[in-house]
Image (cartoon, rainbow, N blue to C red):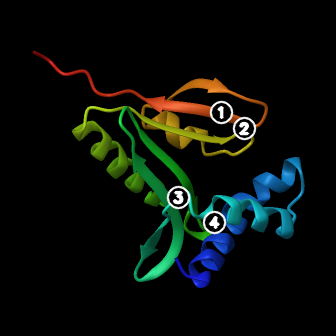
């Protein structure tokens, strides 16, 4: 990935997640850039585009026993317009086709919980800062 990809992903994360991080710890560009750089090569982020404009990022990966959904950030001016629900529904459909659960986590004070709950995710754990959720594989009839 290019440095421009890193900067775009950082800008989107800062605008989308920054206010929620700032509530708890304050936003420190240096710390957040370092954290993103440390994890940059672990995840292949995809750009979310609308009318050829980059409006968000997402990372989704299939593991042997589950799908992992993360780094899901949409710029504030594009939130609450059904875009997140649409993208999440596509990820859920992919997971369902493989009969695997899909898992995610989010900051406890991020209001995104309602989106995940509306789409069938249930809380399976938590730590000091995050809730962990899973949408189980669908039950199929014999």
Give the numbered dot on residue 43: 3
Give the numbered dot on residue 38: none
In the rendered view, does 36 fall on the left or right side of 24? left
Provide the residue designation for mark 2.
108
Among numbered discs 4 and 1, the one appearing first in the sequence? 4
In the rendered view, does 41 fall on the left or right side of 11? left
Q: Secondary structure at mark 4?
A: helix
Q: Secondary structure at mark 2?
A: loop
Q: Is residue 87 above or below residue 121?
A: below
State the separation of the CA atoms marked 1 and 2: 6 Å
Mark 3 or 2, closer to the camera: 3
Residue drawn where x is 51% and y is 34% of the image: 117
Q: Are marks 1 and 2 in contact (CB under 8 Å)?
A: yes
State the separation of the CA atoms marked 3 and 1: 20 Å
In the rendered view, does 135 fall on the left or right side of 30? left
Among numbered discs 4 and 2, the one appearing first in the sequence? 4
Dot 2, crowdedness within 10 Å: few (<14), some or many (≥20)?
A: some
User: In the image, residue 23 lies at what x, y percent?
Assistant: 85, 51
User: In the image, residue 115 lies at what x, y percent?
Assistant: 52, 43
User: In the image, residue 110 lies at what x, y percent?
Assistant: 70, 45
Among numbered discs 3 and 1, the one appearing first in the sequence? 3
Among numbered discs 1 and 2, the one appearing first in the sequence? 2
Residue drawn where x is 75% and y is 59% of the image: 35
Provide the residue designation for mark 1.
131
Provide the residue designation for mark 4.
76
Q: Secondary structure at mark 1?
A: strand
Mark 3 or 4, closer to the camera: 3
Among numbered discs 3 and 4, the one appearing first in the sequence? 3
In what quadrant of the picture does the C terminus appear? top left
Residue drawn where x is 75% and y is 41% of the image: 109
Q: Is residue 84 above or below residue 9?
A: above
């Amino acid at each position: 990935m290019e440095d421009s990809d890193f900067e775009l992903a950082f800008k989107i994360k800062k605008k989308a997640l920054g206010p929620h991080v700032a509530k708890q710890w304050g936003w420190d560009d240096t710390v957040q850039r370092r954290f993103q750089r440390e994890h940059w090569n672990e995840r292949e982020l995809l750009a979310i585009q609308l009318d050829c404009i980059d409006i968000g990022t997402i990372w989704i990966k299939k593991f042997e026993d589950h799908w992992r959904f993360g780094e899901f950030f949409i710029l504030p001016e594009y939130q609450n317009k059904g875009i997140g629900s649409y993208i999440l529904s596509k990820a859920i459909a992919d997971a369902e086709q493989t009969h695997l659960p899909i898992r995610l986590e989010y900051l406890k004070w991020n209001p995104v919980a309602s989106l995940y709950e509306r789409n069938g995710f249930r809380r399976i754990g938590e730590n000091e800062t995050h809730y962990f959720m899973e949408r189980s594989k669908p039950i199929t009839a014999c």
